[in-house]
Amino acid sequence: MKINELILGKYRLLEFLNSGSFSSVFRAREEMTNRTVALKAISRDAYPADRMRYLLTELQAMSNIWGHPNIVSIHTVEPGKDKYLAWIVMEYIEGDNLQKLVQKGDLTLTDVLNIGIDICNGLKTAHAHNILHRDIKPQNILLTSKKEAKIADFSIARIFGESTKFAVTMTGTRRYMAPEQNYGAYDYRADLYATGLVLYEAMTKQFPFSGEADEIDRKKASGEIENLEKCPEEFRNFAIKALHREVDKRFQTAKEMYDELDRIRRWQYEQQASALIAESADSPETELAGALERCRKTFRLHIDIAEQINQNLFFEMRSKVEKENRERVQIRIKQHYADAIEYAQKQDIDGTLRELHKAHNLFLQDAEFVAQADILFKELTTIVPDSNTLTVNEIAELIQKLSESDKMNLLNRFSLTEEILKPEKQPIPEEQFDDEVEQEEYVKPYLSKHRGGQSAGDYRVLIEEASPEFLLDKVHEDIQYHHEEEAAYIYQQAQIYTQQENTHQCLNQYKKLGAFYHRHARRFIKMDEVELVANCYTRARFAYTASKNHRTARKNAKNGAVYYVHLARQLEMQRAWTEAGKSYILAADNYRFAQLELEEEKCESSATVCYFNAAESAHLNGDLQTAYDYCMRILSIGENLQNPPRSVVEAQKLVEEIWKENTG
């Protein structure tokens, strides 16, 4: 055929590309659309009448995979004339095939991994449709300008039927055939072996078996892989498995090969990202973010995967820095204690206390606690009797011998936490409402029974009067999920800026914390983790409120409310009435903050229904105190409702019944 010839009145031939035993390929232009296409002319000699059914079967079967991004798409098949049986109109790939790129020698390990992943992606689909390519080789791997690989030329593909599992015809390019193809009875794993050869050659720029055809066959059969030392270490094990002489010891599916290449790719990204993070200690955050994004695009990783790797790296880096800092501080503390002991041995109490003070200041790297430490040591100087023979251990023993009132005075001046000074719990007065005496519940995590007793995201029932900073402090007291570690770090930075009275940076950190929780809420939506979604949106509300970004805070509050309602309904179906009621209260609080009064009242009404079911259940089981507590909670909620539901009336009746039973 002549270049510039018009075929079928539709396609103008522009350039001859290549030819084989069965066809010739041209670059052409579709006249009606001005689209550039590849035109494959199928030789009539290759398909005599008795083989026509094979061509039709293959074309029909392959129509199922033509739209795959890693398989060259076929637009249509046109009938041929004269010596050409048909014209297959395909997408034209503006790029070289893999053989040419290997010859140029400009492929990196990352390129090879991405190409291998693309090939495996295409083969996964082909094999799923019972198509064995049988001619995977560098010439049949076309690459776009972005080095995205597409498998071409299924002209000798084998279509397996329901009753056939192996091909027996020896066909393909001998150099890239699997050892078993020489003896017949081969399957999809022959394509995987050929893929291993192609990737090995792309990586080392040398074929793994040297010699003439027969010698190459012998080396394949014996597994004598050459030039392994030229493979990067992380790729070496892949090559050994991919080219194993025994079929059952190779990769068994395209997915298995894909997963291994993807694992190596992620590991490579992690190494480079780790180096970027380590080198960017003194660089602006925007520069690091840009470098990591460019690295991600080079490895063609999904953004969620890359971000997860980055977060792990940041966490590891901070943990390492914190560990090193702790070790340095511990060395200094030990030195101060050693000096304190020396002063004590010299009967210098002032020097002893001064060194102990320095040691404790290192422990308490916080302005508030340092001030408390100062008070403590002042108390020590007045409470501990003056003696010229005291040692550090003796000072501690003297403190232990103090009266209980002196100890409490010392501890109160030191402002110890509630956990240390926690008073014994008093019985609930009958005349008080349950919601007035259960303030302790507002700062305790509620347990999700439907999750095997695991904490429901470490959230507290919200107090309307509490500041967002107080609420953030409470929710970050306990770390139970990996993402909370990152959030706690951001929150701590905000606290540091607060102590430094750096308002601008403090607000920025709270805004960053809000964005962090908002982003994780969206991730948990994809994972169908309703509870975590609601919790993250609510924490985002706290953070944005602290950053003075009230509009965004209200949006997150509304989202949090929606998901708490969703969670409450799930719990209702499981008859977990108490937890459902708490979820409705959390939803109501978020709706209140979002200034959606109608939705707020609906949630509070639903909460009273749930608590009444819990009250009835407790009453039936003879637990009058619990039933009474739930009823009082319902009545407390009902006081603020414009249209109290029937559950409020029923709760009042049940309270009266409980009083009668209790007094009778």
Image (cartoon, rainbow, N blue to C red):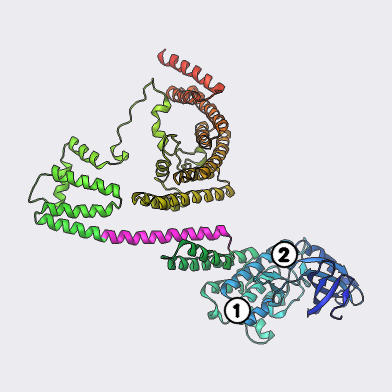
Mark 1–mark 2 Cα distance, whole angstroms, equals 29 Å
Identify residue for label 1. Answer: 106
Write the residue at 76% across / 66% down: 73
Instruction: Residue 279: give x, y in percent of width and height.
Output: 43, 68
* Residues drawn in magenta: 301-330
Question: Label 1 amino acid?
Answer: Asp
Q: Is residue 435 above or below residue 27?
A: above
Instruction: Residue 461: give x, y in percent of width and height.
Output: 45, 36
Q: Helix, strand, or loop for circle 1?
A: loop
Q: Residues within 10 Å of mark 1 (few under 14, many from 20)?
A: few
The foreground one among 43 and 175 is 43
Q: Is residue 441 above or below residue 17?
A: above
Identify residue for label 2. Answer: 126
Q: Quadrant of the C terminus?
A: top left
The foreground one among 615 and 31 is 31
Check whether the beta carbons of the residues at disc 1 and disc 2 lie within 8 A of each other: no
Write the residue at 62% across / 65% down: 258
Q: Quadrant of the N terminus?
A: bottom right
Instruction: Residue 161: give x, y in percent of width and height.
Output: 78, 62
Q: In the rendered structure, does residue 314 fall within the stretch colored magenta? A: yes
Question: Label 2 amino acid?
Answer: Ala
